[in-house]
Each structure stands twice: as structure tokens, then as C-alpha cells.
Image (spheres, helix red, strand yellow):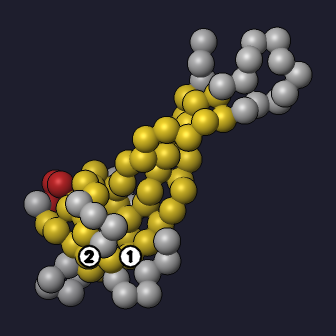
Amino acid sequence: MTQTWEERTGEFEVVADDGHFYRIEELAGMADVTPAGSLIKQSAMTGMKRYCTCDGLSCNRIDEQTYEIVALGLKVRRASGADA
């Protein structure tokens, strides 16, 4: 059976038009692709990414700079100087 998990691969700040800041996490799905019986400890493959606020609200990525916090119906943009 293939083992799967998520890893946080990034975190950055975004800002709404009203000036409120939010922190968004980038999570990548991971899958163990180590062949059965292999001596390799674990070999992982990165899968699809998903985005959410640090308090767990789902986000859609519109483009590299624009995201939508789904539960709030709020479009936000990366804050200038935001870390990737």
C-alpha cells in the first residue's frame, strides 16, 4: 500500500483590498514511491499542491500573485516583499 502525506512547502502573506493581512500556507501532497523490498529508506514524489490560510480556510490560486479565500469569498494579493 502506498503511503501518502502532506508537507508544507511554502508560506507567505497576502493582503485584501481593505488592508487586512492573511498568511497562506502551500501544502504539497507526497507519495512514497520506494519499491517493495528496497534497501532505500524512503523515496518520495511530490504531487498536487493546495493552499490554505494558517487557520485552515481553503484558498484557490488564481495566479502567482492572486488567491481567493473561499469561505470568505475574498480575493487577496501577495504582499510586496512576501517570502515564497
Residue 37's spot in the image, x, y percent? 82, 12
Name the residue located 54 percent from the left edge and 56 percent from the top edge.
Answer: 9
Is 48 situated above or below 67?
Answer: above
Q: Percent x, y for residue 50?
A: 38, 48
Residue sitting nearer the eye, 13 or 80: 80
Mark 2 nearby-residue class (10 Å; few <14, some 14–19, many ≥20): some
Q: Which residue is mark 1?
A: 13
- In this view, the residue in front, 75 or 22, is 75
In this rendering, the count of numbered labels is 2
Q: Which mark sits nearer the N-terminus, 1 or 2?
A: 1
Residue 77: mark in rendering:
2
Figure check: 1 above or below 16? above
47 over 37 or under it: above or below: below
Query: In terms of image quadrants, where is residue 23?
Result: bottom left
Q: Measure the C-alpha gap from mark 1 to mark 2.
A: 9 Å
Q: Position of residue 61 (x, y in %)?
A: 28, 58
